[in-house]
Amino acid sequence: MDELVLGGQRFTSRLVVGTGKYKDFPTMKAALEASGAQMVTVAVRRLDLAARGESSLLHWIPKEMVLLPNTAGCFSAEEAVRTCRLARELQLGGSNPLVKLEVLADPKTLLPDVEETIKAARQLVSEGFRVLPYTNDDPVAARKLEDAGCAAVMPLGAPIGSGLGLRNPYSLQMILDQAKVPVVVDAGVGTASDCAICMEMGAAGLLVNTAISGAKDPVGMARAIRLATEAGRLAYLAGRIPKKLYGSASSPLAGVIGAGGG
Amino acid sequence: MNATVNGESIELPEGLTVATLLRHLGVRAERVAVERNGQVVKKVRHAEEQVSAGDVLEIVTFVGGG
């Protein structure tokens, strides 16, 4: 069985999907199901004390899906650590220690603050969390996060929500070559082919939100991204042919009619 | 007494615990996590943890996100 193991949890799906920015909960639920994902990200936010009888997000997430709380919106290690502690308390007695660590540098680029991310990762690992850190496509940062004890590294393909796809495949290749933990490409995917490209290179998994929730048909895109992720993984396992400058005929060159024999 | 709940300064009755504070605010405890002055208050301690004047409380829940 080809499984993705993240922090001791085993998944047959290599796609992790977000729950943000859907137009409504029924669409989100249908898209989550169509994605085939077994883990979904959720954010931790202040309860709106004025809103009564608010529909709960958790009600719309299929029960069998593992929750991956994130620290989205945190701009310092301290905020991220506090958010993870609250997320653990929110897990209703569950023992899932996985968290998606995300410490951002500024609201415009949404690029990671790697220094704060590493600081938070060390603290969270020491508290028993299994940390999946969102990071830059920087092999040095990835190595430091791995050394800090993270259960995976999650480099961006492009800025969050940008849909630009994998902007620097050479950096990702270096991260993949050195990593001893799973490498999950988090952020930047715009459509199905972006997923296939990352998976063909050997990424262990993908985390996708906006490409699905922002699509014209989120359920259709969830299915497309699921299939592309699976196709990319199968192609990686099957081993692609080397790239060559010149052609190499697929049919025998000998025995072509009208050639020679005169 | 006055305390800060989710960034808002509000007037609260004296002698509240975290459990009675949540009831006072009409919040179901099983759906939230509570932080008091920067420290998580575990659910098993909600009934004994006292809320004091000037406390900074955060009451959070899961929402959609990536």
Image (cartoon, coloured by chain):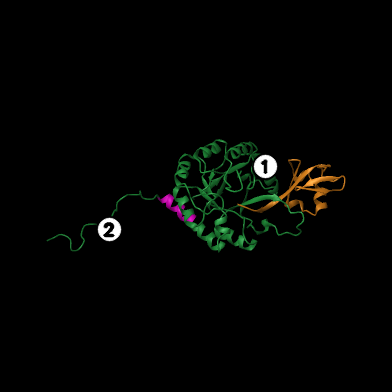
Chain colours: A green, B orange
- A229 inside magenta stretch: yes
In front of the other: A9 or A175: A175
Q: Looking at the picture, which amino acid does disc 1 mark?
A: Glu
Cα–Cα span, label 1 and label 2: 62 Å
Q: Looking at the picture, which amino acid does disc 2 mark?
A: Ser
Which residues lie in the magenta part? Answer: A228-238
- B10 inside magenta stretch: no
Pointer 2 indicates a residue of which chain? Answer: A
Q: Which SS type dominates the magenta stretch?
A: helix
In front of the other: A159 or A231: A159
Residue at label 1? A79
Q: Can residue A206 be seen from the camera position used here?
A: yes
Residue at label 2? A251
In front of the other: B4 or A81: B4
Q: Residue at x 74, y 54 (%)?
A: A48
x and y percentages locating residue A227 in the rendered image: 49, 58
